[in-house]
Image (cartoon, rainbow, N blue to C red):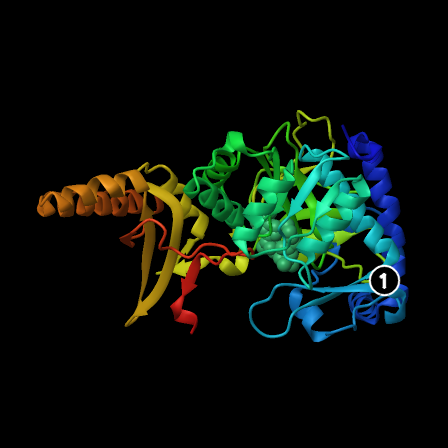
Amino acid sequence: MYYNELETLPRDKLRELQDTQLRQIIGYVYERVPFYQEQFKKLGIQPGDIRSVEDLPGLPFTRKQDLKDHYPFGMLAVPREQTIRVHASSGTTGRATVVCYTRNDIDIFSEVMARSFIAAGARPGMLLHNAYGYGLFTGGLGTHYGAEKLGMTVVPVSGGMTQRQITLILDLKPEVICCTPSYAQTLGEEFKKMGITPQDLSLKYALLGAEPWTETIRANVDANLGVRSTNLYGLSEIIGPGVSQECIEGRAGSHIWEDHFYPEVVDANTGEPLPDGQEGVLIFTHLTREAMPLLRYWTGDITYLTHEPCACGRTHVRMGSIRGRADDMLIIRGANLYPTQIEEVLKSIPEVVPHYQVVVKREGTLDDVEVKVEVAEDVFREITQEAWSEDILEADHQMRNLRDSIQSEIKGIIGLNMKVTLMVPGTIPRSEGGKLRRVVDLRKL
Ligand code: DLL
C-alpha cells in the first residue's frame, strides 16, 4: 500500500517532474532570497542556466553557517507573517538554527510523514504512541501531523517519564510507536525488567530515527518490543522527520521522498558528486518548499545512495543508514573514526551488549580512546557468582580475558589501539527520550 501514487512514478517521469520543479524553485529563490540572488550574480549565472537536476553541481553548497549568518529570518522567501510555524534544530551549543513553514509547507510535511507511516507498516485507524519530543524539535509535531493526516489515533506522549509511557503502552495498546532508537532500547529494557514479554505487548511497528543506529540496535529493539522497526530520517533544515523512510518490505535503506527533496552524495573533501554505493556527504535541494527553500544544503550526514529496484515497488532512490555526521567523525592519531565502527565490532561479541560510550582524551600529544561497554547480564551474573564463591582470581581472570579479546578485536578490525573498560550492566547512560550522545570528546573542552 502507498499513500501517494507519486511514490511509484517511473523514474523518467519522476526526473521530468523534478526538472520542472527545480526550474520553478530556482526562479523563486532568485526573486525572493537576497542570499541566493547575490550568489548567482557573483557566479555570473542566470536562473535560466539551471535547466535540470544535472546542472546542480554547478551551484555552491548552502551550509549551516549560512543559516546562522542570516539568523533568524534572513533566509525567508516569504514575509514572516505568511509562515505559520517555527522549529529549531537541536544544536547543543550556540544558537539554534531556526526554520519556518508556510501552511503549504506544513501540508508537505504532513504528507511526507503520512507516506512514511504507510511505508513503515502503519495503517489508518491504528493507534500511535508518539514518544518523539514535542516543541521546537521537529520530531513530535512532525510525526503527529503526519499520523493525523493518515487517520491514525495519536497519543502525544512526547519524551521522558518512562514509567508513564510504560503504563500508557500497556493500557492503550498502540500498534505503532515512534521515538529515538536509544529510547526504544530504554523502553524495551524496562519491559524486560518488569517481566513483560513482547507477546504481552500490542506493538507491531516502530519508526526510529533522529540519531544514528545499527542493525544490532534494531535486533535488540525488535526482540524486546516485539516490533519490526524501520528507519525514519530527516533534519529540520529540510523539513524535519519524513525526508526519507525505510519500507517494511525491504528494511534495506530509506526511500527519499525525492519529488520534494532532491538528493546528491558528494565527496566530503572535494565536493564532487559520487556514484551510487559510494559514501559521502548527503546534500538536499528543496523542490517544493515555500518559506525557506534551500539549494544544495550540506547536511553533514555520511551515507550512500542506491537506485536498485526495491521489493516494495517504490521507485524513489534509497539512502543507506547514516554512518555518522561529517562533524562527528573523530580524528584519532590521524585516522578517521566513526563511533558506529566501534559498535560494529562490539556487536560481534556476544558477552557484551550494545550499550557503550566512547571517551576521547588527549594525554600529552597523543589521543586516547576509551571504549566503555556493558557486559551482558547473564555473563556478568556468572562471573560475579564465581567471585562470591571465593574464586575471585578466576572471576578476575575471565574479566581480563574478555577485556583483552575486545581490545584486540578492535585493533584487528579498526586498526587503532583503544582501552576497553567493562561496565556493570545498566551503568552506561540511557536515553530519557531525546537524542543520545555516545561520544564524549574531552579534547574539545
Ligand atoms: O532529528 C528530525 C527527525 C526527528 C528525524 C525524528 C527522524 C525522527 P534535527 O534535530 O534537525 O532533526 O537533527 C537532524 O539528526 O542531520 C542527522 O545527523 C540526525 N538524524 C536524523 N535522523 C536520523 C536517522 C531531526 N534516521 C540530524 N539516522 C540529521 C541517523 C539521523 N541520524
Which residue matches tag 1?
29
Quadrant position of the N terminus in the picture: top right
Secondary structure type for disc 1: helix
Relative to 338, does residue 43 appear above or below in the rendering? below
| Residue at 66% across, 33% down | 247
Mark 1: few/some/many CA within 10 Å (<14, 14-19, 20+): many
| Residue at 31% across, 46% down | 410
Q: Nearer the viewer, residue 349 or 414?
A: 349
| Residue at 52% across, 50% down | 183
Q: Nearer the viewer, residue 124 or 404?
A: 124
Figure quadrant of residue 434: bottom right
Quadrant position of the C terminus in the picture: bottom left
Figure quadrant of residue 64: bottom right
Residue 257 drawn at (x, y percent): 74, 42
| Count of all numbered marks drawn on residues in the image | 1
Q: In the figure, is residue 153 to the left or right of 425?
A: right
Residue 121 drawn at (x, y percent): 68, 32
Under 8 Å from ligand 1: the CB of mark 1?
no
Figure quadrant of residue 176: top right
Q: Nearer the viewer, residue 39 or 419?
A: 419
Q: Give, as a three-letter code, the residue at label 1.
A: Val
Residue 301 drawn at (x, y percent): 58, 53
| Residue at 61% across, 46% down | 168
Residue 96 in view in this figure: yes
Residue 353 drawn at (x, y percent): 37, 43
Relative to 76, does residue 272 appear above or below in the rendering? above
Relative to 147, does residue 284 appear above or below in the rendering? below
Residue 208 in view in this figure: no
Relative to 345, does residue 335 appear above or below in the rendering? below
Q: In the figure, is residue 61 to the left or right of 259?
A: left
Q: In the figure, is residue 20 to the left or right of 411?
A: right
